[in-house]
Image (cartoon, grey):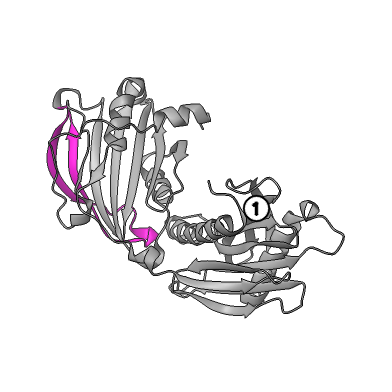
Amino acid sequence: MADEDQISADLGREKAALSDLELAMPGFPTLVFRTAFPEQLDWFDNEEEVTEFAESALFTEFRRLWLGYEPAERDKLEISIYGARIIPERVALPADYGRLFASKWGPDNFGVDGNQFDFGEVLTGETTSGFDWRVRISVWRRGDALLIIRARTNADELERLRPQLAAFIGSLEFTEPADDPIMAGLVRHSITLPSGATFDYGLPPHWKVFTDADAGGRPIAAAVYLDRADQGGNSAIGIFGITVPEGAKAADAPLRDIASGTSDLLLENLLPEVKTTRRPMQEDNISGFRPDTPGMLFLDRLDAPEHRPMGAAGFFLALPTDVVGYSAITAYPTDQEAMGLLMHANFIQRLVVDDLRRQFGASE
């Protein structure tokens, strides 16, 4: 993976004067846009159905609509513009859509930028076939519609073309407003923590309560939700509040043990017959929280005989009197279907993290 400075440069965005050109987006009226188009490219109506991501079960419609290139030097820069319609109950972060597309349009990872709900980018490519090339994948979500721009160039041209691509992506403006019923439709929930404080958070309506227990004087509060739109029952999230014992320091809270223990608790309730082995995969901080409220994200793989691999994620924040956070389980991304399940679970976890940040942290 490239270093952070290189990622920032290759996925940079700049404002520039808008071109007069405006491309029609048949079937996707909210995706019509204006931007600073690269002047050397000719644009061709090139409608073509995209089927290579069908197994992810995320899309009801996916079409390439436009293809832009310079006929005499097509290998230097080629830009494809796509429109896609998503299943709202499987919504994901735009950067995760980019990762999915990179699995087929890359697959090397040269960087990811953006964990927003409406925009994200991935820089991918390939270095092993003798043709060293790069692909910048940019994704915007507007309600249940995705605008996807795929800019492909050979690696030798990337530095020269970087300013044009930065202006092309950075200047993009949609010509029509668009509602976001997915975000507007979140259902608000609340859990009372052992200290008596409350944590308020929003989830999509198809995430239904499995069990819900405020602390009520006990040292732990928990609320567990299942993804009822997933008939396979692969995904669940638990919101937990755990008391900090009297005399203990929140900074000394065993966050790794808490993350593992709460995901074990989920599994015991949801899959009592399944015995798993845990393989820690990643630990990381999440930005936007105060230095005096330490928190950590833990990502694990769970394997069990005769059961598909599962992923476990947990993020917990140590407050002065409570440890609060979530533990989630879903499919581990061994194929496109599992990747689609994981992508939606990531979206749910990001909702919870944002609510934790708003209530207990500092804004980004």
Part of the protein shown in magenta: 41-70
Q: How many marks?
A: 1
The percent position of residue 238, horizontal first and vertical second, equals 61, 69
> Can I make out residue 235 in this image?
no
The percent position of residue 105, horizontal first and vertical second, equals 35, 41
Residue 223 vs residue 15: left or right? Answer: right
According to the image, label 1 marks what residue?
298
Callout 1 crowding tier (Cα within 10 Å): few <14, some 14–19, many ≥20: many
In this orientation, which residue lies closer to the viewer: 287 or 232?
287
- For mark 1, give the secondary structure: strand
The percent position of residue 176, horizontal first and vertical second, equals 20, 53
Q: Is residue 68 magenta?
A: yes
Name which residue lies at 16% across and 34% down. 19
- Is residue 131 positioned above or below 220 on the image? above
Quadrant in the picture for residue 321: bottom right
Q: Is residue 37 magenta?
A: no
Name which residue lies at 64% across and 61% down. 325
- Is residue 82 positioned above or below 130 on the image? below
> Can I make out residue 149 in this image?
yes
In this orientation, which residue lies closer to the viewer: 244 or 11?
244
Q: What is the magenta segment's predominant secondary structure?
A: strand
Name which residue lies at 61% across and 79% down. 211
Residue 250 vs residue 341: left or right? Answer: right
The percent position of residue 255, horizontal first and vertical second, equals 73, 55
Task: State the residue lying farthest toward the right.
Answer: 247
Residue 89 vs residue 332: left or right? Answer: left
- Is residue 86 positioned above or below 133 on the image? below
Residue type (three-letter) at the residue carrying disc 1: Phe
In this orientation, which residue lies closer to the viewer: 24 or 171?
171
